[in-house]
Amino acid sequence: MASTPEALAQAPLEWDTPLYRMAVSQFEQAVEVAKVPAEIAERLRFPERAFIVSVPVRMDDGRRVVFPGYRVQHSSILGPTKGGIRYDPQVTLGECAALAMWMTWKCALLRLPYGGAKGGVRCDPRSLSSREIEGLTRRFTSELLPIIGPQEDIPAPDMATNEQTMAWMMDTYSMQLGYAVPEIVTGKPIAIGGSVFRHEATGAGVVMVVGRACDRLGLRLEEMRCVVQGFGNVGGIAALELYERGATVTAVSDASGGLHEEDGLDVPALHAYAREHGSLADNDTGRRISNEELLELECDVLVLAAREDQLTAENAPRINASMIAEGANGPTTLGADAILAERGILILPDVLTNAGGVTVSYFEWVQDLGRLFWTRDEIRAKLADKLSDAFDRVWDLAEEQRSTLRTAALVGGIREVSQALEARGIFP
Ligand code: NAD
């Protein structure tokens, strides 16, 4: 067995999972183009810190169940780490490590003073009552106390977590300190220091990026026929924004399946239905289709806003969209990426396209620290500026280096972090 310091350092890849391998492969492709010194690249290939906890919860039927929880902080070189908390049966250390790495590139690309983090609890949130989720959230937050803080690591919502989850996290943290600490999380209710427009920010940001791409391509957003996968915080809002900006949304889906109406769906009505019933299951609008069918529908823009691994080498040859907007993190595998590039289908990559969420989270944190709150119009305008600036840098870099937008976005983010690492050096 090799026993050089380098070989030993790389041997125990605790986070080695398909998603982490995908994040690292994307990193390897981009780092070559970014021309980052080897020793800097080595530092960025692995997360700085990973934390595993066991979260005991008293269930409604009296049982006690212990859930595994994780928080991974990829890089703190530019500031506190930042990233969502998800509750999902597929949460693992490796998934969190991959998502934390993408958060680092995303924050750096948007020039936010943050590094990337991600965390979550492996559980099936749909089988838990609200009281059980509250217990799980409060105990998970207590377990994370040694590593989170407004200047250290600031959680936010992600899959199956929302404003209420963040309120419980904020309350649990504040009770330990004895005073209100709204800046410990973002994506909170407005009543406790949340920012107006945070709830809509990721989905609205997706549509701002699609709009910008249309401008560059000489297309009109209102003439686009769009399909949206996922009808939660990101997909539901993206569908609504597309509808409100005049585009035709021909299909949407959630975990229960999809709805297809060639003439266009009444998205506000579907929103109201999902809010009342918790999902689109049993809604009889249009034609019922499976999620697999939805992905292959003919359209101008396919918005992926459900979860990772949706476009693969298997279904990529049958994708019938001209443009793909990645609202979710990691929805396109490396195999699919290559096939879609070959077929000339434009992919607006996750690190750019869904960055509206973390950008307005940053605005929320700044407002909480300053105890001074901005209006919705101010925030929307600041978000549009930030996304346009990042979009233009990515588009121009892709043209200059003749690469995909994904590689350009990653190169942009990696260069920002690399410059900071070079300037700071290694302690001690
Ligand atoms: P969410 O839980 O609010 O919504 C997820 C939606 O996807 C739900 O409608 C769910 O039913 C649906 N879904 C799950 N599996 C599906 C499948 N196989 N096919 C079709 N639909 C499916 O979560 P969210 O916050 O909207 O996050 C969605 C994605 O966006 C995740 O990848 C997340 O990491 C990413 N993201 C979220 C934010 C944010 O601000 N919430 C920011 C950036 C990125």
Image: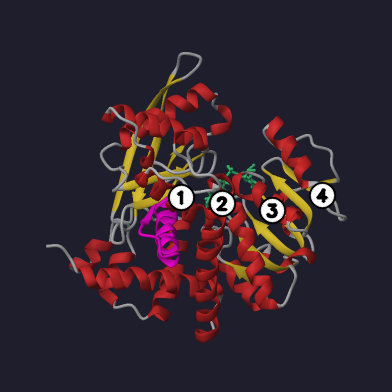
Which is nearer the N-term, disc 4 or disc 2?
2
- Kindly check if marks 2 and 3 are in contact, taking CB atoms under 8 A apart as contact: no
Residue 400 horizontal/vertical position (percent): 51, 86
Q: Which residue was labeled with disc 2?
A: 201
Say whether disc 2 or disc 3 marks the residue closer to the N-terminus: 2
- Residue 274 horizontal/vertical position (percent): 71, 36
Instruction: Determine the CA span between mark 4 and mark 3.
Output: 13 Å
Work out whether residue 256 can be spotted: yes
Tell me how far mark 1 sits from mark 2, CA to CA: 9 Å
Secondary element under disc 2, as helix, strand or loop, is helix
What residue did someone put label 4 on?
A: 265
Q: Which residue is mark 3?
A: 241
- The answer as to whether callout 2 falls within 8 Å of ligand 1 is yes
Nearest to the observer: residue 79 or residue 42:
79
Q: Residue 152's mark? A: none
User: Which of pointers 1 and 2 lies earlier in the amino acid sequence?
Assistant: 2
Q: CA distance from mark 1 to mark 4?
A: 31 Å
Q: Secondary structure at mark 1?
A: helix
Question: Which residue type does callout 4 highlight?
Answer: Leu
Distance from the alpha carbon under mark 2 to that under mark 3: 11 Å
Frontmost residue, 377 versus 228: 377
Q: Tag 1: residue type?
A: Ser
Identify the residue under disc 1. 361
State the image quarter where residue 46 is shown: bottom left
The earlier-in-sequence mark between 1 and 3 is 3
Q: Are marks 1 and 2 in contact (CB under 8 Å)?
A: yes
Q: Amino acid at mark 3?
A: Glu
142 shown above or below 415: above
